[in-house]
Amino acid sequence: MRTLSTAEQIEKLNALMEIANNAAKSNSFIEKMGACAIYAGVIDFYAIQAARLLEEIILKAQLAVDGKTTFMPHDDSYFYEAPVGTSRILKVFRTQLPFKPAENTKTEDAEKVSIAAKKFKESFDKFLANRNILLHQIGNPAKTLIDIEQLPPRLIEIFNECIGKANEFFKLVTPFRFSEKEMKHFYGERKNAGGGQ
């Protein structure tokens, strides 16, 4: 199966986000549920990109210490061929906090990134917990249809918070990402190896 180019991947994700955003504004319960399903997939995508970024941060710190690394980074296929759960990614992410400075970064930068990473992780945990409540409560005999219909707007609101925290984290973490030289060292000339935020 052919892998989408970075441009095709961005186009696909933008199209899905437009569909979800339009559905989220609808008065239809089914459309809001559809928006929540797409948003859940986007949250998984962001978590995978964060996991890949975490690998870069760890490897870059290892290179800064003694020039040696203990593993090779994974490309997107690793996370999709044998699905890796979002909650598992977030648990591993938490174990790596706080981040350590690497190469041309300062301790203050690492502290700022660590704070943003913690907020990112907490917002994603909140989304997953509320997604699970939405799915789990559908069959609850103590919940009316009106109760259930009130859940998607809350999840949509939490999703928007998540995206804000994710974008803040991805912006601050830029100095900790692989340089062109490191990208070539780890990935060679493979396309879409470092695709992410």
Image (cartoon, rainbow, N blue to C red):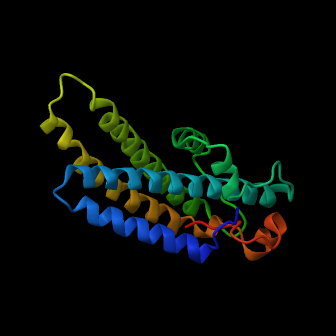
Q: Position of residue 97 (x, y in %)?
A: 58, 46
**Percent from the top left, x then y, of residue 117?**
50, 53
The residue drawn where x is 81% and y is 49% is 71
Which residue is painted at 55% across and 38% down in the image? 91
- In this rendering, is residue 90 above or below 60? above
Q: Nearer the viewer, residue 17 or 61?
A: 17
Total labels: the figure holds 0
Residue 127, can we see it? Answer: yes
Q: Is residue 81 left or right of residue 116?
A: right
Is 111 located above or below residue 150 in the figure?
below
Identify the residue at horizontal 39%, vertical 66% (top origin). 17
- When asked about the image quadrant of residue 138, the answer is top left
* Residue 81 rendering spot, x and y as whole percentages: 67, 48
Q: Residue at x 71, y 58 (%)?
A: 75
115 displayed left or right of 183: left
Q: Quadrant of the N terminus?
A: bottom right
Q: Classify residue 5 by image quadrant.
A: bottom right
Q: Is residue 179 above or below residue 23?
A: below
Could you tell me if residue 57 is visible in this image?
A: no
Q: Position of residue 102 (x, y in %)?
A: 70, 61
Compare residues 174 and 140 and report the one nearer the observer. Answer: 140
In front: 12, or 76?
12
